[in-house]
Image (cartoon, rainbow, N blue to C red):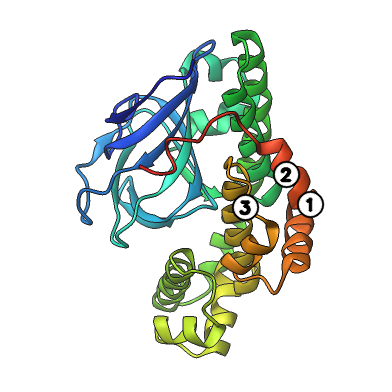
Amino acid sequence: MPAEGIGSDPRRHTTPARWRVLGHPDGMLIYQARCIVENHGWTETVTQDHHKIMLGRSGAYRRRLNGRVELSDATSVLLTRPGDDLAVAHPFGCGDSYTCLEIDPSVLAERPDAQRWMDRSGWAGTSDATLDLAHRLLVAEFRRGLDRFEMAERLQRFLARLLHHSDLAADEVDAEVERAVRRRPATLAAHRRLADRAREVLAHSDFTLGLSEVAREVGSSPHHLSRVFQRVTGGSLTAYRNRLRVRAVLDTLAEPDGRPLGALATEYGFADQAHLTRVVSEQVGHPPARLRRLLATAGKDPTVNA
């Protein structure tokens, strides 16, 4: 049976959490956690002692990885190495939930596709819809129950997919850095702050805010905000909002209460059930009814209501 509890994470981390260990096969540990917010300021900096992957599921927080401050949300993926320094803050007054995968160096040393991660410092990026669904399906399968052999193989396959994704994303970031050096540093920094602020507002909204309301919240015009967000993130505000909404829907579909899809459409700001179905299907390739069956687990996830 998966182990679960409240307190420090299964291995030393930055914040107390409610956690559930899903498996520990062949030099790998996978668990889910929801942070328990005791204060909104920065935690003590913790030096990482494992190669660790953190995949966002809900909520948002600020992270300081090796001195660089950025926003983490439900779309975020964070890779750290032993020796990386990490601190977090929850200025928004709510916790976040995530899935964590810790991997022994001996496991990574056998993988040519892990060399880039082994050689560089911590990396932070985002997951696309297909990677996020693969992550959630993996969790659902672990919670249903797997033997150690199948656990290890499924984690190895997921790791291959994630490392490929992170390498492609890192290449895109390198290209963006080359383009950025041609722009004024002060302007670039201001645009990044504006985009991050918009992400914060959307990550903690109930998805009923209009574009004008989000723009007012961040002190910008709708046109300027839309243009800057596209330039900084490579995607539109609408696309980012839909990514957050779909992740929230997937979280809810995994719960055992089986709320009607029409109620979910209203809760997450879709025009109607057909609109919810269309957006979810476009992003992850399956309609909500099928996803509910795929993500269903026997019991309620204790990390959700910490």
Dot 2: element: helix
Q: CA distance from mark 2 to mark 1?
A: 6 Å
Which residue bears the numbered disc 3? 259
Location of residue 181 in the rendering, given as x and y in whole percent from the top left corner: 50, 68
- Does 17 sit left or right of 245 as displayed? left
Q: Amino acid at mark 3?
A: Arg
Q: Residue at x 27, y 37 (%)?
A: 16
For this rendering, which residue is in front, 184 or 150? 150
Q: Quadrant of residue 238?
A: bottom right
Say if residue 234 shows up in the picture: no
Dot 3: element: loop
Q: Is residue 125 above or below residue 241?
A: above
Which mark sits nearer the N-terminus, 1 or 3?
3
Location of residue 215 in the rendering, given as x and y in whole percent from the top left corner: 48, 84
| Dots 2, 1 in contact, CB < 8 A | yes
Q: Is residue 165 above or below residue 40?
A: above
Tell me the tag on residue 287. 1
